[in-house]
């Protein structure tokens, strides 16, 4: 459903009452109700048996992961799985668990993009309907000042809307291409760890995604490299093959230094080695910086690969 720009919303903007920074907890009842409406749309398949299987599968997975018999304690015994999941979203105090449910719903919906009208969506173009639901839930998050976004069937945490729009989303667009399947999983893994506060794991997956992207570019070009090489040596192969343009030498030297030192070195110092007798901590600001830097590096590498592949003369 389209999000209506009601008078009350316009008035809040005029008065400067809209949230200007993102928060990540304390979903109020209004947002939870809106989430339930959107989930009802995105999984609103007219085949009741299939709808029950989808909601039942989500409930069963969450019950197993959380180690409980029911997602909601006080739900009456004859409640359907649809009612159980909706009530869970309305009352669950742990926001991460609410987002678990949201993510599973949208992950299942991705399976219906190519199944069209036969599966009962309200539109013949299932992909457009799913995209409209994604757009609505992302708008609802933004209206409430919550730093989350659904993309590619996953929930991502947003720390800076500008960086998310300029780096993370373009990186996802490139990584959704089949040849980048490996780095895509690692990139999403980094954000999943980050959302759950596993910052060391986020750093490790960020570097894996970065290294894997370089390897894909090298393989697409047919350039030889040692698969066990770290990022610095992989970058050296790119530079040796003139993958980067030759003009603005000083700028490119600075850029190569940035690529060789920022993402890999932070990972190596903070998350890649033993921590000794004292437990080391990774600051959230450092983890966010690495993720955004990784996204920017991936966009640059993928963009150059696509651009130079299109302009290369036929052999």
Image: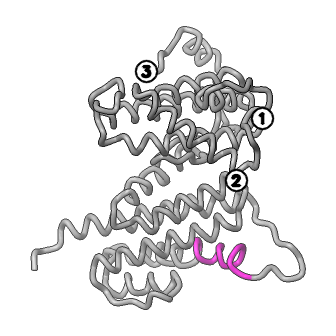
SS state under label 1: loop
Label 3 sits on residue: 2
Q: Position of 1 compared to 8: left or right?
A: left
SS state under label 3: loop
At label 2, counting other C-alpha atoms closer than 10 Å, the crowd grade (few under 14, some 14-19, many 20 or more) is: few
Name the quadrant containing residue 252: bottom left
**Residue 211 visible here:** yes
Residue 8, given in percent of the width and then of the height, sits at 59, 10
How many numbered badges does the structure rendering display? Answer: 3
Which residue is pictured at 55% across the width and 36% down the height? Answer: 55
Question: Is residue 272 shown in magenta?
Answer: yes
Question: Is residue 85 shown in magenta?
Answer: no
Quarter occupied by the C terminus: bottom left
| Above or below 203: residue 285 | above
Please report whichever mark, 2 or 3, sits nearer to the chain's N-terminal start: 3
**Residue 42 visible here:** no
Front: mark 2 or 1: 1
In the image, the segment drawn in magenta is 262-273
Q: Which mark is residue 196?
A: 2
Front: mark 1 or 3: 1
At label 3, counting other C-alpha atoms closer than 10 Å, the crowd grade (few under 14, some 14-19, many 20 or more) is: few
Q: Position of 167 compared to 95: left or right?
A: left
Which is the main secondary structure of the residues drawn in magenta?
A: helix
In this view of the protein, which residue sits in the foreground, 129 or 61? 61
Residue 94, given in percent of the width and then of the height, sits at 76, 40
Q: Which mark is residue 93?
A: 1
Name the quadrant containing residue 89: top right
């Amino acid at each position: 459903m389209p999000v209506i720009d009601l008078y009350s919303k316009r008035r809040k903007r005029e008065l400067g009452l809209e949230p200007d920074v993102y928060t990540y907890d304390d979903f109020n009842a209004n947002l939870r109700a809106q989430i339930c409406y959107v989930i009802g749309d995105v999984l609103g398949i007219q085949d009741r048996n299939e709808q029950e299987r989808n909601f039942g599968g989500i409930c069963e997975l969450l019950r197993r992961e959380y180690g409980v018999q029911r997602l909601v304690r006080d739900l009456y015994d004859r409640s359907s799985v649809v009612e159980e999941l909706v009530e869970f979203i309305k009352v669950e105090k742990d926001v991460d668990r609410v987002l678990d449910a949201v993510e599973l719903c949208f992950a299942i919906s991705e399976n219906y993009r190519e199944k069209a009208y036969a599966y009962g969506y309200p539109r013949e173009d299932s992909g457009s309907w799913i995209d409209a639901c994604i757009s609505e839930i992302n708008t609802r998050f933004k209206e409430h000042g919550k730093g989350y976004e659904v993309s590619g069937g996953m929930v991502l945490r947003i720390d800076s809307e500008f960086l998310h729009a300029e780096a993370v989303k373009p990186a996802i667009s490139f990584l959704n291409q089949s040849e980048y399947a490996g780095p895509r999983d690692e990139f999403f893994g980094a954000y999943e760890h980050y959302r759950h506060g596993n910052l060391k794991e986020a750093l490790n997956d960020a570097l894996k995604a970065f290294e894997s992207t370089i390897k894909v570019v090298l393989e697409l070009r047919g350039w030889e490299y040692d698969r066990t090489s770290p990022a610095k040596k992989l970058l050296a192969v790119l530079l040796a093959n003139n993958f980067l343009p030759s003009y603005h030498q000083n700028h490119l030297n600075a850029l190569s230094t940035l690529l060789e030192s920022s993402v890999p070195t932070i990972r190596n110092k903070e998350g890649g080695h033993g921590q000794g007798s004292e437990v080391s901590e990774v600051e959230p600001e450092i983890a966010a910086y690495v993720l955004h830097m990784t996204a920017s590096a991936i966009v640059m590498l993928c963009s150059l690969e696509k651009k130079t592949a299109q302009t290369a003369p036929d052999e």
